[in-house]
Image: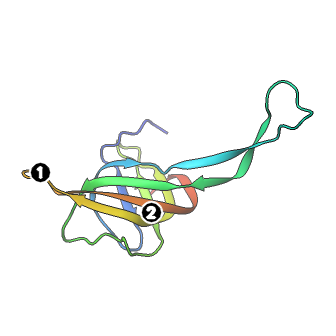
C-alpha cells in the first residue's frame, strides 16, 4: 500500500446516501484493553496480556454543508466507507450511526459542518471500493 494523501478522500453512507465534501476526518478510533496478570508471585516487572475484544469507537468528519442534503442524525445503522485520496483507492469499511451533527457559518465563508459517528462491530481495513 502506498502512502495516502487526505486530499481526494471520500466518505460514503450506504443507506442514507448522505453526500458531502469532506475537509477532514479523524478515525476510525480503535482501542484494545490490556489485562493485568500480575499476582503476588510475580517478580520484577508487571505482566499483562491483550484483551481479545477491540473497541471500535468513533469516526469524525468535517466538511462543507450542502443545504439540499439532510444529515442522517436520526437514521439507522448503515455501512460507511472511507476511501483514502492520493490515488491509493483503499480505505476502511464499517457500520455506524450518526450521534452528533453541527453546522456553522461565518460571514463571507462557506457553511461547514462537523459530525461524529459511533461504530458498531468490526472495522475492515484496506477496503477497495
Determine contact: label 1, label 2, CB under 8 Å. no
Q: Quick one: label 1 or label 2, which is nearer the N terminus?
A: 2
- Where does the image place residue 45, in percent across and percent down from the top left? 80, 26
Residue at horizontal 77 percent and vertical 38 percent from the top: 48
Q: Nearer the viewer, residue 67 or 86?
A: 67
**Is there any visible trace of residue 128 in the rendered image?**
no
Quadrant of the snapshot with the C terminus: bottom left
Q: Residue at x 56, y 55 (%)?
A: 56
Q: Quadrant of residue 63?
A: bottom left
Image quarter for residue 72?
bottom left
Q: Which residue is mark 1?
A: 109
Residue holding disc 2: 80
Dot 1 surroundings within 10 Å: few (below 14), some, or many (20 or more)? few
Please name the residue shown 38% across and 75% down the image: 74
Asked if residue 73 lies left or right of residue 78, the reply is left
Residue pictured at 40% horizontal, 52% vertical? 83
Q: Residues within 10 Å of mark 2 (few under 14, many from 20)?
A: many
Residue furthest toward the top?
44
Residue placed most toward the observer, 80 or 127: 80
Q: Is residue 88 above or below residue 71?
A: above
Amino acid at each position: 500500500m502506498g502512502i495516502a494523501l487526505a486530499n481526494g478522500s471520500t466518505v460514503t453512507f450506504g443507506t442514507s446516501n448522505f453526500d458531502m465534501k469532506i475537509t477532514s476526518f479523524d478515525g476510525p478510533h480503535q482501542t484494545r484493553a490490556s489485562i493485568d496478570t500480575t499476582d503476588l508471585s510475580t517478580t520484577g516487572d508487571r505482566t499483562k496480556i491483550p484483551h481479545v475484544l477491540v473497541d471500535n469507537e468513533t469516526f469524525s468528519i468535517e466538511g462543507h454543508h450542502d443545504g439540499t442534503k439532510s444529515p442522517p442524525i436520526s437514521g439507522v445503522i448503515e455501512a460507511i466507507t472511507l476511501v483514502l485520496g492520493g490515488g491509493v483507492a483503499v480505505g476502511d469499511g464499517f457500520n455506524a450511526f450518526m450521534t452528533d451533527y453541527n453546522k456553522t457559518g461565518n460571514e463571507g465563508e462557506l457553511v461547514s459542518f462537523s459530525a461524529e459517528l459511533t461504530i458498531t462491530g468490526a472495522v475492515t481495513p484496506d477496503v477497495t471500493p
